[in-house]
Image (cartoon, grey):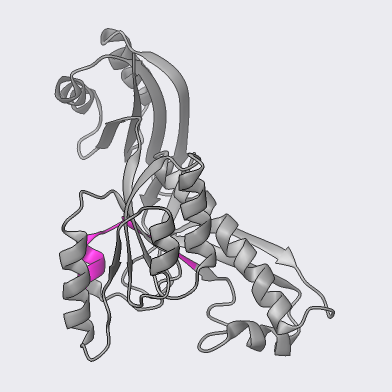
Amino acid sequence: MSQYILKIDCQDEKGLIYRVADAVFKYKLNIVKNDEFVDKEHGKFFMRAELSGEINKNEFLGTLEAVLPNGANIYIRLKDKKNIVLMATKESHVLGDILLKHFRGELNANILAVISNYDDLKELVQKFEIPFFCASHENLSREEHEKMVLEILAKFNLDFIVLAKYMRILSNSFVEQYKEKIINIHHSFLPAFIGANPYRQAYERGVKIIGATAHFVNNNLDEGPIIAQDVITVNHEFDWKDMQRAGRNVEKVVLSTALDLALEDRIFVHKNKTVIF
């Protein structure tokens, strides 16, 4: 029996859950799990359901469109592995963590490739028998370099791009081609500690917590919809290198959490925020 994920977001009205449940019943589907939320400020309804059974997706979609408000966003997909491409620069901690999860069968995704603007991580990636592409940015304008990267990405039917400490700023035109499909991780000191070596800056300020934020990439640097965050406490005994090591551990956990949520279709983006079930 097939398993499906159904996601709906639309203007809130009375009876929406009943209408969806009635459509599910007519198609002899079983609701394995269901979550819903109403954003009262904006009058928006969000619903995620896990279904089992056999359906004609187009027919079922048409039935739902007929009973939901105009402009409803309806997403239905088989509950299967998604395709992702990882992008990195030189830091290995986040990339290595994702590769290990994939190797152990703990990642609900197919890693199609790793793209980097340096070849430092090539040997690591090849140990996992995953295609590695070096798209060097040296002596290229940003437009020329992004064109090279986009040509590589075009080879793949991907669901998400994961920036595993990819350290180049993406242009608006690049982001628009993969809207709500690019997931990034950064340390939570931004914007207080920007530029070179934020952990040394944080150490010099005597911070007491450090953390990380995973978010979708939009046209505003590091200001896209937040998916996951976490923090840990530090104290006077930590030097900046201790903080850096601790921060890298948090980055791994937070990006892994965000990626799992995306791969399981648990995220809705509404304005510049997320609803997560």
Looking at the rendering, the stretch of residues picked out in magenta corresponds to 173-185
Asked whether the viewer can see residue 22, the reply is yes
Percent position (x, y) of residue 83? 31, 46
Q: State the residue lying farthest toward the right.
A: 237
Q: In this orientation, which residue lies closer to the viewer: 128 or 206? A: 128
Image quadrant holding the N terminus, namely top left
Q: In this orientation, which residue lies closer to the viewer: 221 or 79? A: 79
> Is residue 182 in the magenta section?
yes
Q: Is residue 49 above or below residue 1?
A: below
Asked where in the image residue 115 lies, by quadrant, the reply is bottom left
Asked whether the viewer can see residue 228, the reply is no
> Is residue 123 in the magenta section?
no
Q: In this orientation, which residue lies closer to the viewer: 85 or 122? A: 122
Asked where in the image residue 208 lies, by quadrant, the reply is bottom right
Q: How many marks on residues?
A: 0
Q: In this orientation, which residue lies closer to the viewer: 105 or 166? A: 105
Residue in the picture at 33% in, 42% down: 82
Percent position (x, y) of residue 267? 42, 45
Residue in the picture at 15% in, 20% down: 59
Percent position (x, y) of residue 68? 25, 28
Q: Is residue 236 left or right of residue 65?
A: right
Asked where in the image residue 254 lies, by quadrant, the reply is bottom right
Percent position (x, y) of residue 135? 26, 74
Residue in the picture at 39% in, 46% down: 268
